[in-house]
């Protein structure tokens, strides 16, 4: 394990999301003398400006590190127990950092939704992490933590209601109020550009089991067109984050030893509503999503205002369907804009949870929900504005 000069380093603290993470730690853990954290980025002057702007203590340590300078990354990870990185696209800027963490035994947390890159890192560094003691955790924000834990809660409800988990769960987005930043758009753009040049990347993007090396489960619902969901008696429409969330849910199932079964089927769609009105809305949502152009979104470093972040929210439903048609339902709700207001709290609490609540998690490359389960749910409820509930 690396030196424990710091518990957490926030890498990318001058970026839009990184600043939110640093601001959350500064505000929520103010006066916590047991938490030693630092801010890192390419420019010490910019880091100092951000530190002052977010109200962090004037003695908050600042570390200069650059994704293009492997030596600076190595020096950074050797000072800390864990790194939170918001520097994406990870396909372009994540390789050296995760390699350094896996080699040094430093825990790692990111917000990645880039499936092919995640698979590449799993293949390249699983053994390194196991040897060094590092715990590597992808997708610790809105993609895909509420969905991974929502399925977990639905299966816990199924165990109580039916005596066992079920092989079919539906993820349904009831409401989602929020915006996304230029960093998200940049990640999507880089991924599609890479896929256009590499058929292997395209194949991984299309594979529901891209993140379960050595395992291929049953055919999954395509989720690519509006349809009537008989279990909800409502129309549903494609959800733009399903391609990453579903992959992480299947990886979580594998990491937990397949408690949901090797025949587990999971999909995610957005709820439009019942009847003809629901059908029309489902089709209009899909049409609108198809017209979204990446060039129309903010540039990297930009994103929703404080007011937009604080007025945002989300409400997710997870339906576990037994073979005889009975249902067990669980919901996950968040009190902020999902991509940024809520995400910055989630990734911060993932790092705190591993540090304080679940230090026994074995080394390797994890999904955070599979690694920390009930203890992470409690911490997210206590500190991050999330609510998990069983519904009738």
Image (cartoon, helix red, strand yellow):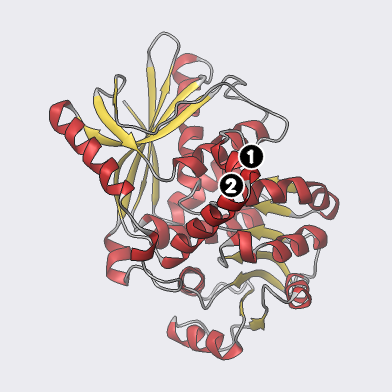
Q: Where 84 sits versus 160, above or below?
A: below
Q: Quadrant of residue 173?
A: top left
Q: Measuring from the top left, give residue 63's x and y in whole percent.
A: 66, 82
Q: Residue at x 50, y 19 (%)?
A: 166
Q: Measuring from the top left, give residue 88's x and y in whole percent.
A: 56, 64
Do residues under tags 2 and 1 come within 8 Å of each other at their CB atoms? Answer: yes
The front one of 355 and 148 is 148
Q: CA distance from mark 2 to mark 1?
A: 7 Å
Tell me if 111 is positioned left or right of 64 in this view.
Answer: left
The quadrant the C terminus occupies is: top left
Q: Residues within 10 Å of mark 1 (few under 14, many from 20)?
A: many
The quadrant the N terminus occupies is: bottom right
Which is nearer the N-term, disc 2 or disc 1?
2
Residue 211, numbered circle: 1
Q: Judge whether residue 290 can be spotted in this image.
A: yes
For the residue labelled by badge 1, is the local secondary structure a helix, a strand or a loop? loop
What residue occupies the far bottom of the structure in this picture? Answer: 45
Q: Which residue is mark 2?
A: 115
Q: Residue at x 18, y 28 (%)?
A: 274
Q: Measuring from the top left, give residue 105's x and y in whole percent.
A: 79, 59
Q: Residue at x 41, y 71 (%)?
A: 299
Q: Where 89 sits versus 358, above or below?
A: below
Q: Residue at x 51, y 73 (%)?
A: 22
Tell me if 347 is positioned left or right of 34 in this view.
Answer: left
Residue 345, numbered circle: none
Q: Residues within 10 Å of mark 2 (few under 14, many from 20)?
A: many
């Amino acid at each position: 394990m690396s030196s424990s000069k710091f518990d957490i380093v926030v890498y990318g603290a001058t970026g839009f999301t990184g600043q939110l993470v640093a601001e959350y730690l500064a505000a929520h853990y103010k006066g916590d003398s047991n938490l030693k954290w630092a801010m890192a980025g390419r420019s010490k002057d910019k880091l100092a400006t951000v530190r002052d702007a977010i109200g962090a203590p004037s003695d908050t340590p600042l570390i200069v590190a650059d994704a293009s300078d492997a030596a600076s990354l190595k020096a950074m990870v050797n000072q800390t127990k864990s790194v939170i990185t918001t520097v994406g696209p990870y396909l372009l800027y994540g390789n050296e950092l995760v390699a350094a963490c896996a080699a040094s035994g430093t825990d790692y947390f990111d917000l990645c939704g880039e499936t092919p890159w995640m698979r590449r890192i799993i293949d390249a560094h699983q053994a390194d992490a196991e040897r060094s003691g590092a715990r590597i955790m992808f997708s610790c924000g809105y993609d895909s933590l509420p969905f991974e834990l929502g399925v977990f809660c639905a299966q816990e409800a199924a165990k109580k209601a039916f005596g066992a988990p079920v092989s079919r769960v539906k993820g349904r987005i009831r409401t989602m109020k929020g915006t996304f930043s230029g960093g998200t758009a940049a990640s999507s753009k880089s991924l599609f550009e890479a896929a256009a040049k590499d058929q292997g990347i395209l194949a991984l993007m299309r594979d529901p089991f891209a993140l379960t090396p050595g395992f291929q489960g049953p055919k999954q619902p395509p989720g690519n067109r509006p349809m009537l969901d008989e279990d909800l008696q409502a129309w549903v429409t494609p959800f733009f984050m399903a391609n990453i969330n579903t992959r992480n849910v299947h990886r979580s199932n594998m990491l937990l030893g397949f408690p949901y079964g090797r025949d587990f089927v999971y999909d995610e769609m957005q709820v439009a509503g019942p009847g003809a009105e629901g059908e029309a809305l489902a089709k209009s949502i899909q049409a609108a999503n198809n017209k979204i152009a990446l060039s129309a979104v903010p540039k990297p470093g930009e994103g929703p205002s404080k007011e937009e972040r604080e007025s945002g929210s989300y409400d997710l439903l997870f339906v576990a369907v037994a073979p005889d048609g009975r249902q067990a339902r669980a919901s996950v709700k968040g009190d902020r804009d999902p991509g940024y207001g809520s995400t910055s709290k989630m990734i911060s609490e993932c790092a705190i949870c591993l540090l304080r609540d679940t230090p026994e998690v074995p080394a390797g490359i994890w999904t955070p929900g599979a690694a920390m389960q009930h203890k992470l749910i409690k911490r997210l409820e206590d500190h991050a504005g999330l609510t998990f509930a069983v519904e009738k």
